[in-house]
Image: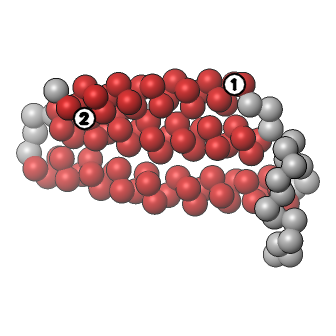
């Protein structure tokens, strides 16, 4: 039963993340929406699958390793994309500019 809660959370997160990618106006806010969609949605769906699947402990462990890798790699990749977009000259629409003082 709990797997359906995680599945519903994952589907909802994916839906609103995709909606944010369509609706938001600049690359940084779209990147934020897609990262939340990927991290929250995919992790919840994979966790629901790990609970629901009728397989060995090794298969469930592989699902948990996949969740760990998603939680580790997705934020690093999104930060690299945002920094690359900033360095290529794409300005954020909103007034927050965290990279303005960064000289690297």
Q: How is the image coloured?
A: secondary structure
Mark positioned earlier in the residue sequence (1 or 2): 1
Q: Are marks 1 and 2 in contact (CB under 8 Å)?
A: no
Query: Is 51 on the left-hand or right-hand side of 80?
Result: left
- Viewer-side residue, 93 vs 90: 93
Q: Quadrant of residue 69?
A: bottom left
Residue at x 77% of width, y 58% of height: 84
Q: Is residue 45 above or below residue 68?
A: above
Question: How many numbered marks appear?
Answer: 2
Residue 83 is situated, as x and y percent measured from the top left of the image, at 75, 59
In this rendering, would 58 be left or right of 34? left
**Closer to us: 102 or 74:** 102
Q: Based on the displayed image, in which of its 4 quarters is residue 11 positioned?
A: top left
**Which residue in the protein does label 2 denote?**
49
Q: Position of residue 44 (x, y in %)?
A: 35, 38
Which residue does the image show at 57% across and 44% down from the upper left?
A: 35
Label 1: which residue? Answer: 22
């Amino acid at each position: 039963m709990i797997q359906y809660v995680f599945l519903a959370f994952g589907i909802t997160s994916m839906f609103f993340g995709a909606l944010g990618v369509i609706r938001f106006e600049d690359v940084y806010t779209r990147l934020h929406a897609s990262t939340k969609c990927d991290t929250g949605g995919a992790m919840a769906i994979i966790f629901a699958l790990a609970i629901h699947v009728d397989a060995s402990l090794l298969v469930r462990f592989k699902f948990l390793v996949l969740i760990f890798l998603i939680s580790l790699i997705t934020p690093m990749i999104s930060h690299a994309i945002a920094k690359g977009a900033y360095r290529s000259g794409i300005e954020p629409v909103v007034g927050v500019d965290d990279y303005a003082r960064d000289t690297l």
